[in-house]
Amino acid sequence: MNSVEPNVIPFPTIRRFPAYLRLLKDLAGNGKEWISATTLAEDLKLKPIQVRKDMACTGVEGKPKVGFQVSELILAIEHYLGWDDTTYAALIGAGNLGSALIGYKGFVDNGLRIIAIFDKDRRKVGRQVGGIVISQLEDLAETVKELKIHIAILTVPAEAAQSVAEYAVASGIKGIWNFAPKSLNLPDGVVIQKTDLATSFAELSAKLKASE
Ligand code: ATP
């Protein structure tokens, strides 16, 4: 397998990687060893040219007639995404959204494991969600260090997001997956990924209206 230079893979390709992985793992589970770009394209409703370009980004070379080796593609994509090593995360804000994310089994399949939960609500501290005891926020730094956690998943209300994010960074967190509907201002070097459900819904509504 050739090594892949991380910076050269475009984001749209990276966003398609999880869908490729799901399909490839299904195929591997059914004992399929090889897959053509055309079949991948059909199954994922993509253009074959697009799939060929995406596959080129993985560094895996296809063979004439048989296509790509399924196991090699899985390894290459997982390696690129860092999903061959489990990433440990702390979730901050054990409300409705946070609890739903804790219960989502798909993260584990994709190498993300939430191993600690924090909340400022004293009534919640000590309770369990998904088998994990909710801790007080003041324990974040110690837990981050002890359990080598790099990522925090932020599911606190918008008004708390900035201060909680700053606290998380001061506690040693390097990457923040922000589900709060609030843009964060953090020092350079902290990686922020925003997933704003309200914005997604606004987009859906606007598209629906435009299609009427
Ligand atoms: P609930 O009503 O059970 O609290 P919710 O989803 O409506 O659920 P939100 O107001 O969205 O609650 O808050 C999400 C969670 O974030 C709550 O558990 C809340 O206690 C927690 N939270 C709020 N502010 C902070 C903060 N500064 N630090 C840590 N957790 C916080």
Image: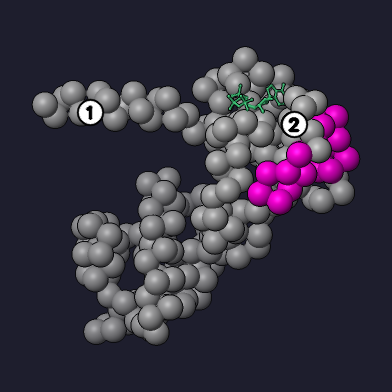
Is residue 129 at all visible to an observer of this figure? yes
- Residues at badges 2 and 1 in contact (C-beta under 8 Å)? no
- Mark 2 to mark 1: distance in Å? 39 Å
**Residue located at (44% from left, 51% from top):** 14
Drawn side of residue 185 relative to residue 69, left or right? right
How busy is the neighbourhood of tag 2: few (under 14 within 10 Å), some, or many (20 plus)?
A: some
Membership of 143 in magenta stretch: yes
Res 191 quadrant in image: top right
Residue stretch in magenta = 127-144
**Residue located at (77% from left, 44% from top):** 133
- Residue type beneath disc 1: Lys
Relative height, residue 3 to residue 182 (above, below)? below
**Residue located at (43% from left, 64% from top):** 21
Relative height, residue 87 to residue 30 (above, below)? above
Expressed as whole percent of the image width and height from the top left, the position of residue 69 reads 40, 79
Tell me the residue that label 2 is attached to.
124
Relative height, residue 183 to residue 132 (above, below)? above
Drawn side of residue 16 relative to residue 115, left or right? left
Where on the image, by quarter, is ligand 1? top right
How busy is the neighbourhood of tag 1: few (under 14 within 10 Å), some, or many (20 plus)?
A: few
Expressed as whole percent of the image width and height from the top left, the position of residue 159 reads 62, 15
Drawn side of residue 78 relative to residue 143, left or right? left
Which secondary structure, mark 1?
helix
Disc 2 residue: CB within 8 Å of ligand 1:
yes
Quadrant the C terminus occupies:
top left
Tell me the residue that label 1 is attached to.
207
Membership of 82 in magenta stretch: no
Foreground pick, 35 / 195: 195
Expressed as whole percent of the image width and height from the top left, the position of residue 130 reads 66, 49
Q: Which mark is residue 146?
A: none
